[in-house]
Amino acid sequence: MAFCLTQGNVDDRRPVLKLFIELTGLAAGDKGYISKKMVAKLAKAGVSFITKAKKNMKTVKRTAFEKFFLANRPVIEAVIGQFKEICRIEHSRHRNPDNFLINLLAALAAYTFNAKKPSIDLKAFNQSALIPN
């Protein structure tokens, strides 16, 4: 698990490279993360970063698994929702920056022990891969 705190006026793409330092494989992001330079740097590090294309972009050929993976991106939103609702990570009235950081770290730790984390069912991919498009 990795996280990065930035000010509200920082481009979300900035900390991505730091967050993926130890990772390899496939990663998905929303359209706001599209950057040729960032995708190239991540590819060099061993991460295949995919997003849905914007309306004004050429369509990119995707493997069946990449399409399945992108279709299941709402799982990420479910995780964020759990942080906000269950772990109470979205609390704006901290009187001390230390309290904010303690609340954040406690929420991240609590989430790791959560037995019912959102996940992607890869069995569904195996079944859908057998059905032609």
Image: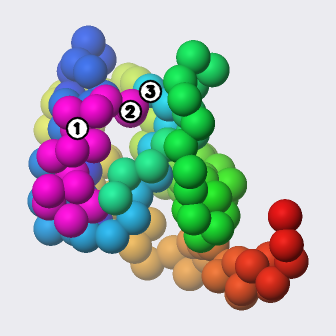
Dot 3, how many residues are within 10 Å of its Cα: few (below 14), some (14-19), or many (20+)?
A: few
In percent of width and height, residue 39 lies at 27, 43
The span picked out in magenta is 33-47
Q: Disc 2 designates what residue?
A: 33
Q: Residues within 10 Å of mark 2 (few under 14, many from 20)?
A: some
Q: Which residue is mark 1?
A: 38
Q: Residue at x 27, y 61 (%)?
A: 47
Q: Secondary structure at mark 1?
A: helix
Contact, mark 2 vs mark 1 (Cβ under 8 Å): yes
Classify residue 94 by image quadrant: top left
Check the image and report above or below for 28 versus 115.
above
Return the residue nearer the eye: 75 or 37: 37
Amino acid type, callout 2: Tyr
Residue at image position (31%, 47%) is: 103
CA–CA distance between discs 3 and 1?
A: 12 Å
Residue 70 pos. (x, y %): 60, 54
